[in-house]
Image: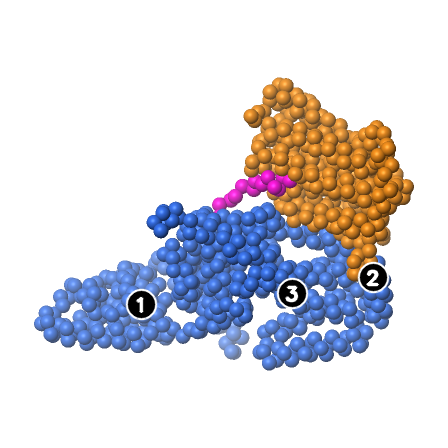
Amino acid sequence: MGYTKNPKNIKAMEKNRTPQLKSEEKVDLTLDKSVSKNLDKFKAFLEESSDAVFREFKLGMQGIPCALVYIDGLVDKMLIHEQILKPMMYQIAILENTVQRPIEPDKAFDYVKMHALAVGEIKEAETLDEAFLFIMSGEVGIIIEGFDKILIASARGWPQRGIQEPPSEIVIRGPREGFTETLRSNTALLRRKIRDPNFVIKTIRIGRRGKTDVAYAYIKGIANQGLVEEVERRLNQIDVDIFLDSSQIEHHIQDSYLTIFPQIEVSERPDRTAASLAEGRVAILMDNSPYALIVPATFYQFFQSSEDYYERWPLSSVIRILRWVGALLASLTPGLYVAIVSFHPGFIPTSLAISIAATRATVPFPAFLEALLMELTFELLREAGARLPRAIGQTIGIVGGLIIGDAAVRAGITSPIMVIVVAITAIASFIIPSYNAALGIRLMRFPFIIIAAVFGIYGVILGFIIINVHMVTMKSYGVSFMSPQAPIRYQDWKDFLIRLPSQMAMRRPTSTYPVDIDRRDQDPVKEDTQ
Amino acid sequence: MKERTDRLSNLQISFIISSTVIGVTVLVLPRTATELAKSGGFIATFVTGLLMAFILMIIALLARRFPNSTIIEYSREIIGFVPAKILGIVFFIYFITIGSAILRIFCDAVKVLLLEQTPLEILIITFLFVVVYLCLNGISSIAKICELFEPLVIGTMLLVIILSFRNFNSEELLPAFKQDVFEWISAIPSLTISYLGIEILLFAVPFVQNPDKILGYGLLGILPSIIIYTLLVAVTLGSVGVEPVVQSLYPVIQLARYIRFPGGFAERFDIFFMVFWILGAYTTLSSYTYMASVSLSRILGLRNFKPLSILVIPFLYILSLMPQNIKEIGTFSQYASYLGLAVLAVLVILYILAVIFKKGEVKK
């Protein structure tokens, strides 16, 4: 790429940096009645794009000039051939011939719409701008001579990933389908679970250039109207040109960016999303992203897996408590180790203290440095393994975990106890079902190590207090992040630290302020008619 | 969702009272109780608790008459402008005094028991900053923190009490029943400091959803402290003995050291106890800092108390460093306790005046 080194070219590039089509007001966006003039208007924008297709043809017996405009790759070609081109060019002519009544040119538009196009979804575009929006989303624009509007036929069809098991939320028991990158199939997955007409899916377009479809879904009559309005308000104020993933939307609609905790729940699972909708939450789905955003989120949601609801309640309750223990271990163990070894060896039984001291005798570093070093090594290994192909990832695990760990102990760089601590931290951090919450919780151990090195166990407690104060001050869409524990809502505790049998948890959680609190059908009118 | 006003629920009132009351002084409580009341210390603690519950009732009744303002504002209605200002200043001094007394007791205990090498000043200033971080977030955050921490604090104390029953010797307590009633009463003024904190009700009521019910929930808030304090003093006396308790610096730590963790998992229960005691101390001091900064803001006629809670830091810092040794800390906290009793008496008088002059809203 030699041209970048050429100063002349760079100057030319800089001169051309003023965008040609920056302000669309300068361009005439109205449509003309003539096909050729309309086509020219389209071509003014699309001529340089190789994927734009312009197909001119004649309609029916009289040969009224027509044209198709679509983007190759976004449309289903078979559908265009069989249901759009074939009827318009050929079958209409046969029809005209048999009934011996040619179509009048000034009614051609409605005639085509009503009799020719065997396509389910037909719209009309009045301006060029509107037409572009449809065409760029994979629909076909049909221009007919004599009309200053364009017929839009939906023929969307592009290569897409099939519905697979979501890799980030694997369950043993429960549905195995996950969201894909296509918004329509994602909304269909939800609709299949909630067939209520009150289940609303509204779509808006976000991004000045990306114009991505973003849908927010909720169940009318359960979700709080204030919550829905707040979601609408936050989505509408986004002004960024291109969005690539729903996480970018998350960054724009979350409450605060000054935190390590996610304030919006993310899920790849339609069943989990549907369950949240039934609790009165709002789901936000984006085209091109397999992750649904669910608001509002509380801290405790990140410790719940959809499988909790599919397994027997005592077992899933135990597993939930285990996750809490895991979170505490993942964030506190290295800090506590440093505090106990360097400040309070008396806290642990004497025999254990002596054996720790004996294994640490050969270690040249203070406990603080040892812990920091080993935890850093673990993070390196994890990050190295995370983005590698699976086969190589395993090698990293063996090399990192077994060889380095063993060699580090033998070489006297670290003590075996420290290796145990790191291993416990690592395993405990992976027990938290939500990946993004687990990341924050796991990284918390570094500040804990540092504060433990300065203030011992007192420092660990101070750190714990600061984290807790930070969390209670957080809110997600008007809901306290730590509810139902702070503020306490005992009604919600049926599905909190433990999960009581479904028969006992017939009321929805009150944290989201649902309109309809009861899951059962308590409509008195219906009860009377039965 | 639309901004929801951060109103406190009634249960939060209970939590906020109980966690403001239970705090630092738990550590020295058995000694304070025993010094004057001897083996009747637990009865003296119980009697003080009942007295405090009674005063809490009066405070609740007083606060219920003026559900929309704090004591600093409505005292003007009862006793007039200038006396109310003076009373406000007295309140501020009182909160600062109690705050710095418990801060000093706390940091001293941390220094003695956990961090011998760390300078006291560092301990005080770090704890103060963590406290002010919470205060800056307002009373609803304080209430939430109380809800998170209070179960842990109460749970650990109950655990200490239950595990200590093994060492419990009831003979140590028997002389209590031969004692003169006056001996118990003589311990009340020094014991008051352990129950101080019920005044938070005066500052919390303007934020309560349903001020009509604060009486019941307020009593629910002081109930855990009465039970735990009485049991703790009794258990400490029974297992450590009257004389050692009077001699000991931190009798509860002494008590916790006697405990053998089942299974020998942790050698020293006292550190375990300390950990959760720090949480209790934190909520207590946060409440006092909050009350001090709010009362200061009301005296100055300001709506926003947040800048003032930073202003309160130097006051607390300097005052808490005033006592030079353990003995002076004891005297300091004793005077703080007397001041607390005096302030509570003033509150009772205020209530009587409010009833006589028919000020505020009267509930049927």
**At which x and y percent is residue A365?**
81, 67
Q: In front of the other: label 1 or label 2?
A: 2
Tell me, yes or no, whether the highlighted magenta stretch contains residue A136. no
A348 or A393: which is nearer to us?
A348
Q: Amino acid at mark 1?
A: Ser
Task: Specify start and end residues of the magenta stretch as a single range.
Answer: B1-14
Chain B palette colour? orange
| Residue that badge 1 annotates | A154
Are there few (<14), some (14-19), or many (20+) residues within 10 Å of tag 2? some
Are there few (<14), some (14-19), or many (20+) residues within 10 Å of tag 1? many
Q: How many marks?
A: 3
**At which x and y percent is residue A197?**
36, 56
**Taking B312 as reference, is A271 above or below it?**
below
At numbered mark 1, what does the secondary structure look like: helix, strand or loop? strand
| Residue that badge 3 annotates | A429
**Taking B330 as reference, is B112 above or below it?**
below
Looking at the rendered structure, whether the residues under marks 1 and 2 are on a common chain is answered as: yes
Q: In front of the other: label 3 or label 1?
A: 3
Does residue A52 show up? no
Chain A palette colour? blue
The residue under the point 82% across, 56% down is: B260
Q: Amino acid at mark 2?
A: Pro
Q: Amino acid at mark 3?
A: Ser
Q: Is residue A97 left or right of residue A242?
A: left
At numbered mark 3, what does the secondary structure look like: helix, strand or loop? helix
Q: In front of the other: label 3 or label 2?
A: 2
| Residue that badge 2 annotates | A349
B291 or B25: which is nearer to us?
B25
Q: Earlier in the sequence, mark 3 or mark 1?
A: 1
Cα distance in 3D space between marks 3 and 1: 47 Å
